[in-house]
Image: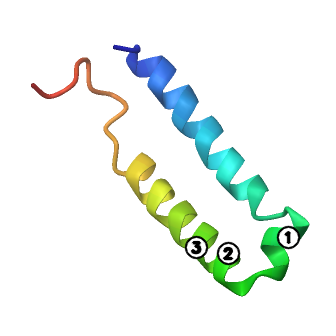
Amino acid sequence: MISHEGHHILDSLNLATIALSALYKPIRKNKMAISFHSLVLTLAIANVSLTDWEADTYAK
C-alpha cells in the first residue's frame, strides 16, 4: 500500500495528465473525445476534492 502522501502526489499528477491530454490536437478536434476527457477530469477533481487528506489512516 502506498503512503497517504504518495497517494496525494499521484492523484495530483493524474489530474494534471488528464487536463494536459485535452490539449492534444486530435483530442481537441474530436467532440466526443473532448466531452469524455472533460467528464473524466470533472469526476477526478470531485474525487480528489472529497478526499480527507488530513486522515491518518485509510478506513478499514
Name the residue beneath numbered marker 3: 36
Amino acid type, residue under disc 2 in the picture: Ala
| SS of the residue under disc 2 | helix
**Residue at the spot of label 2:** 33
Q: Residue at x 69, y 76 (%)?
A: 34
Secondary structure of the residue carrying numbered label 1: helix
Percent x, y of residue 41: 56, 61
Looking at the rendered image, the quarter that the C terminus falls into is top left
Name the residue located 77 percent from the left edge and 54 percent from the top edge: 20
Distance of label 3 from label 1 (alpha carbons): 13 Å
Q: Earlier in the sequence, mark 2 or mark 1?
A: 1
Name the spot of residue 38 as percent of width and height, x first: 61, 71
Residue that badge 1 annotates = 26
State yes or no: discs 3 and 1 in contact (Cβ < 8 Å): no
Question: Is 32 left or right of 57, judged from the image as shown?
Answer: right
What is the distance, in whole Å, between disc 2 and disc 1 at their CAs?
9 Å
